[in-house]
Structure formats: C-alpha cells, structure tokens
Image: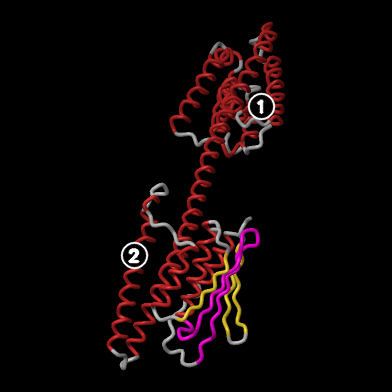
C-alpha cells in the first residue's frame, strides 16, 4: 500500500505516550465489561467471570509487544476478545496500532477476524438476548473507525518521516557540495601557489647558489645577483600575500585584487627572466587579436612553468619559446631547452606537481599539454583552443 517500510517511520514512544494508551485501553475494557456483563458473570457463570478477567490481563500483556509482532498480537488479542469483554481495550489498541502500518493485506485479514469475533460474541453471550442485531449494526462503524484512525495516524507518521528524510538528504547533499567546493578551491589555490611562487623562488635559489659556490665573482656581479635575490624575494612575498588573500576574501570581494596575468604580460615575464641572467628566446607569432582571458592566463602559466623548469634543471642552457596561433585555429606554445650535462649537485629540488597542475589547467579550457625528450632537448607543448 505504501513503499516505505512501516518500521522506519514508527516513532519511539515515550513513557507518557505509552501510559495514556494503556490507561485508555483499561478504561475501554472497564466500561465494556463492568456495564452489566461482569455482574451477570459473577452471579450465573463465575468461571466465565474469572476467565474474562484473566483474558483481559493476558491481552493487556500481549499488547505491549504490538510493535515487535503487530499481526500476531492483533490476531491473538482479537481471538481472546471473543470470550473476554475485559480484552476489548487491548484489542482496540492492537487493531489501531496495526492499522498505522497501512498494509492492505494485514488490514483486510484482521478486519475479517474482527468480524468473526463479533459474530461469535453475539452468539455465545446470553446477556444480549434480542439485542444482537443492534450489537452487530454498531460494531461495523466502530471497527471502520478504528481502522480509519490507525491509517490516519500512520499516514501522518509517514509524512513526517518523509519530510525528515528529505531534510536529512538535503543537508547531506549540501554538506557534500560544500566539501567538494572546498576541495576544488584548495586544489585551485595549490596550483596558484605553485605557479606564482615556484618561478620566483627558483630565481632566488639559483642566484643564491651562485653566490655560495662562486667566491671569485667581482663585486658588480655580486651586487647584481643580490639585487635579483632581493627583488624576487620581495615579489614572492607580494604574490604570496595576494594568493593567501583568496582565503580571506569573500566571493564578491574580489574587485580589489590585482588582475591575473594574461598573454599580454608574457614579454614582461621573459624580460624579467633575462634580467635575472637566463638566456631566453621568445618568438611571438600570435594574432594581434586578444585571446579569451582564461586561454591567455593558461598560456602565461605554461611559459612561466617552462622558465621555472629551465631554472631548476638546466640553468645554463638556452630556452626557446615559440607561440603561434590565431582565432579559429587555436594556440600552440612550444618551449624547448637542451638537457643539462654535468654535475647535478646544485640542482634545485623538484615537486613533480608543476606539469600536473598545468595539465589540469589545460584540461579545464579544453586544451592538451604534452612533454617529451627529443634527442638532447626537453620539449613542452601546449595546444589551446581559440574560438573564431
């Protein structure tokens, strides 16, 4: 009759909820039994009197297990009610409790058993005499009312259970979305931290290493290297402050942040690397039209990562960067540098995350990133879409 398991939405009854149900059952039994029946039994059939009383007590004990065995308890109490008027109250409680499950097969079965029990009572009770027709007529609306009340209570319980489940599922889904958003944001910030800081710190480490190992440098070169270290350390702190500001700022409070770098900043990036002592060749065959912002930012980050890798792995080599493309054909950026030959003692530590982060960036904009070793050169190739 309903898809939800009745055991799921049956609430746990507190002691006072149990108490008023049992008190009401006892009152129904008292009204039914003591309204002339008990006196007649005591005077004309004392054994029936005691059997009726015992049957009522047994039914009251059985009805306490109606939640665990609803059908069995309702059937047993109904059968006891065929000869025990004192079991009328527990029988009503058991039938109503069964009806709250709203299962048609159970309701029909117990309803037929109640009808048979009513007929048996009218046949074996000598006190009814000619009133048995009235009893049968009144029993029909009473039984229908009991089942109707039980089904209404069950419907309310199922509705409340469904609402609670929807609220719980909605909260769980919201918590899951928040967790996914937090994870994605942390991954984005981690990529941003790597892209922003690795380039600066690699320059600082390279020039600091030169000062540590080259004790024969003239004062002018020492001063130049110190200025590079100072400038890049200052820029690294500035970039770090801006990236960490992402963690503090609200989503709507980004208007004051410095604009993210784009492809127009590539000449400045390459110029800064040259000023720091790197040998970089940049060939820009891109269309004069500006590519989309996300595409330009991805291109900038790839060239920045290529410079960083050259600083780490081949600081004495020439890095060649070729950029070509136009709207409709896409953008191709190729960076290549010779593999370093010689000692690896002073190489900078690698994290292995730079190219992984760039691959994710390329995937986000529909591009591809590949790297390979061709002969004695390391080649990094980025292909990005550029809509017409």
Find residue 289 and report its horizontal and vertical position in percent. 56, 58
Which residue is located at x 40 percent, y 73 percent?
272
Q: Taking 44 as reference, is 326 above or below it?
A: below
On the image, which quarter does residue 66 sit in?
Answer: top right
Q: Is residue 315 rendered magenta in the image?
A: yes
How many angstroms separate mark 2 from mark 1 (CA)?
86 Å
Please state which of residues 320 and 208 is positioned toward the viewer in this rendering.
320
Which residue is located at x 63 percent, y 30 percent?
74
- Horizontally, residue 155 falls left or right of residue 213, namely right
Point out the tag, 2 or 1, that comes first from the N-terminus.
Answer: 1
On the image, which quarter does residue 361 sit in?
Answer: bottom right
User: Could you tell me what secondary structure mostly forms the magenta stretch?
Assistant: strand
Q: Taking 124 as reference, is 277 above or below it?
A: below
Residue 227 appears anywhere in the view: yes
Quadrant of the drawing holding the C terminus: bottom right
Residue at label 1? 79
Quadrant of the drawing holding the N terminus: top right
- Horizontally, residue 345 falls left or right of residue 319, namely left
Q: Is residue 54 rendered magenta in the image?
A: no
- Horizontally, residue 83 falls left or right of residue 277, namely right
Please state which of residues 153 and 306 is positioned toward the viewer in this rendering.
306
Q: Which residues are magenta?
A: 312-341
Q: Taking 207 as reference, is 247 above or below it?
A: above
Residue 51 appears anywhere in the view: no
Q: Residue furthest front?
A: 288
Question: SS class of the residue under badge 1?
Answer: helix
Q: Taking 186 as reference, is 323 above or below it?
A: below
Q: Residue furthest top?
A: 130
Residue at label 2? 238
Which residue is located at x 65 percent, y 34 percent?
72
């Amino acid at each position: 009759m309903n898809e939800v398991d009745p055991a799921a939405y049956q609430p746990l009854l507190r002691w006072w909820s149990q108490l008023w149900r049992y008190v009401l059952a006892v009152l129904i039994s008292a009204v039914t039994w003591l309204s002339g029946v008990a006196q007649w039994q005591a005077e004309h059939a004392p054994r029936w009197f005691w059997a009726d009383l015992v049957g009522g007590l047994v039914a009251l004990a059985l009805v306490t297990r109606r939640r665990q065995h609803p059908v069995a308890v309702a059937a047993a109490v109904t059968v006891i009610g065929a000869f025990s008027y004192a079991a009328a109250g527990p029988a009503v409680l058991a039938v109503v409790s069964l009806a709250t499950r709203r299962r048609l097969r159970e309701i029909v079965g117990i309803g037929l058993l109640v009808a048979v029990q009513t007929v048996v009572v009218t046949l074996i009770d000598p006190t009814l005499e000619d009133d048995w027709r009235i009893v049968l007529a009144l029993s029909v609306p009473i039984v229908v009312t009991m089942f109707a009340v039980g089904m209404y209570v069950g419907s309310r319980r199922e509705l409340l259970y469904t609402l609670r489940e929807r609220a719980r599922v909605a909260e769980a889904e919201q918590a899951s979305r928040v967790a996914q958003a937090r994870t994605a944001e942390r991954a984005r910030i981690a990529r941003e931290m790597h892209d922003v800081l690795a380039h600066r710190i690699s320059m600082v480490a390279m020039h600091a290493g030169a000062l540590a190992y080259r004790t024969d440098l003239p004062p002018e070169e020492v001063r130049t290297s110190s200025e590079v270290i100072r400038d890049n350390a200052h820029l690294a702190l500035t970039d770090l402050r801006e990236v960490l500001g992402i963690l503090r700022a609200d989503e709507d409070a980004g208007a004051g942040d410095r604009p993210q770098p784009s492809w127009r900043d590539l000449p400045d990036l390459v110029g800064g690397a040259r000023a720091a002592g790197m040998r970089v060749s940049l060939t820009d065959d891109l269309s004069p039209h500006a590519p989309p912002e996300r595409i330009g930012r991805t291109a900038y980050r790839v060239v920045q990562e290529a410079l960083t890798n050259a600083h780490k792995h081949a600081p004495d080599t020439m890095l060649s960067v070729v950029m070509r493309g136009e709207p409709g054909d896409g953008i191709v950026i190729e960076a290549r540098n010779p593999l370093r030959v010689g000692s690896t003692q002073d190489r900078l530590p690698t994290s292995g995350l730079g190219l992984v982060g760039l691959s994710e960036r390329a995937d986000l904009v529909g591009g591809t990133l590949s790297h390979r070793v061709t002969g004695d050169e390391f080649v990094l190739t980025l292909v990005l879409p550029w809509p017409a």
